[in-house]
Image (cartoon, rainbow, N blue to C red):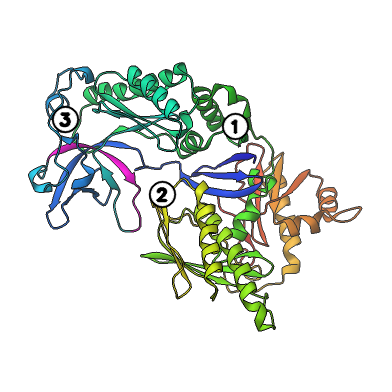
Amino acid sequence: MDSKLLLDVTNDEINIALLEDSTLVEYYKEKRSLSYAVGDIYLAKVKKLLPGLNAAFVDVGYEKEGFLHYLDLGVNFNTVDSFVKNQVVVKGKHLSMGKVKQESDLPKVGHVTDVLSVGREILVQVTKEPISTKGPRLTAEISLAGRSVVLMPFYNKVSVSQKIVSYKERNRLRKIVKAACPNNYGAIVRTVAEGKSADELENELEILVERWEEALVSLQKNRKSAPFLVVEEVSRAEAILRDHLNRNFESIVINDKDVYEEIKSYIGLIEPSKSGIVKYYDDQLPVFDVYNVTKQLKSSFGRIAPFSKGAYLVIDHTEAMHVIDVNSGIRVNKDSSEQEESAFEVNMMAVDEVAHQLRLRDMGGIVIIDLIDMHTQVHNDKVYERMVENLKSDSAKHNVLPITKFGLMQITRQRVRPVTYVNTMENCPICGGSSKIYSSILFTDVLERKAYFVFNVLKVKKALLYVHPYVYAYLKQGFISLKTKMCLKHLFRLKILPNQNFSYLQYQFVDADGGEIDVTEEVDSMFVKVKA
């Protein structure tokens, strides 16, 4: 299985697509001004105690306070709190992890009012991004994730992933990491560390320790009132590479020079042998169009998601859960004796697509699947087992329950960020959303007039025109195409390219530097000009 990672970088956001054998399996949109990402560490301030929930609301600078439960304080909270009190809050003291005094463990059963007080400053880490009306979910158990190990400041224990089954390998990794961890540092050895050499693990630990201690020095030098950011998590693209990069990765394609350099440097740090797979995309066609991502986005993110031979899913999102209805579509057998087999066949294909959709949309929380009714228990069991098998490759924590007597399958899946949403709807090609109708046959005349305006009024020497693929085909057809006639008539050179993400009569003029050319000279109610 070959994997590709595509990064489409715009002025406002980074669009990230993970492909496996050319099939889109994960998609993320990350704002370039993103804040409160999972993994960020803050010096925060307790704003309110909730004895009934045994939790606290904590201010990390977001409009909604973060939620911190007593159980998320961690057994080493007293040690971390003592460090904050004696070395962070008090100015002028040298921050030294080696001199941290280990305090007594926090009881697993207790009351938040006995531990925290309003106005207190504590170190917290974001475990869930803000979702809907809720603020971020927090923990006081601080960690820094690397590719092979997770560094745990203030701990002295080393744990090894249960997925590494060899006792000999587990013991080898534990010894290496234990010897490499400085005093008052612990670690969790990740599954990907299996087979790694001592030098690789030691180098990664050294980098993580250095990153943490640099943050502490910066914390002391730039001391200000809480809340403020102490350690920033790596970007979403780097996090995907950290968690998913393996020998099956074929290429990482990026259309922005700065991000390309950043990712290449990161790959050289975590996997030097793979730095050659990072490629800079410098073509005029959109990178997502070239790798068929745009079409897959349009077909996969709608309310209705077709999957095979006319069958389809209907996906609805609510505040409490995600509901998926399985429909056989045109697959209807007149013979009643074949209905059971037909239902079983559709359900088997449906759970394949549901597993794909869960990962693609990053759906978390409760998911209810309304399958086509089957009367044979053997079929129910096989469909359930197929779903369990499909989700083995899903890195998010999940739990699948057997099919109920009502034909429902229930799944819970870890939710750490809002569900990914892609608008697959387009403006009406007749009125452009204005509800005023003009003749669409005049669209080529509008493009010709706009091109004349660009070259002869704005005096642009070189320009590109992006249009919908159907319009592109129409303008380019024939021995002497409309595009050629237009250029010869007005004596200018215009290059036209298709963009699959455009609606039917949408267009955009772009200069040689890739910036949008404003061609507004009058109100064109019918036609849709893309906004920058």
Q: Is residue 78 magenta?
A: no
Counting every numbered tag in the picture gives: 3
- Position in image of residue 446 (x %, y %): 71, 60
State left or right for residue 101 relative to residue 213: left
Residue 221 visible in the picture: yes
User: Viewed as shown, does residue 101 lie left or right of 208?
Assistant: left
Residue 397 image label:
2
- Name the N-terminal-most of marks 2 and 3: 3
Instruction: Left or right? Give the position of 299 relative to 97.
Output: right
Q: Nearer the viewer, residue 159 or 155?
A: 159
Task: Give, as a single range, the part of the protein colored magenta.
Answer: 120-132
Whether residue 8 is situated above or below residue 152 in the rendered picture: below
Disc on res. 247: 1
Residue neighbourhood size for the residue with mark 3, other residues' Cα within 10 Å, grouped as few (<14), some (14–19), many (≥20): some
Name which residue type carries label 2.
Lys
Could you say whether the residue bearing mark 2 is in a helix, strand or loop? loop
Q: Position of residue 383 (x, y in %)?
A: 54, 63
Kind of residue at disc 3: Thr
At x 12%, y 32%, the residue is 104
Residue 42 x %, y %: 26, 36
Q: Which mark is residue 465?
A: none
Q: Which residue is mark 3?
A: 79
Residue 423 seen in the figure = no
Query: Depth-wise, is mark 2 or mark 3 nearer the camera?
Result: 2
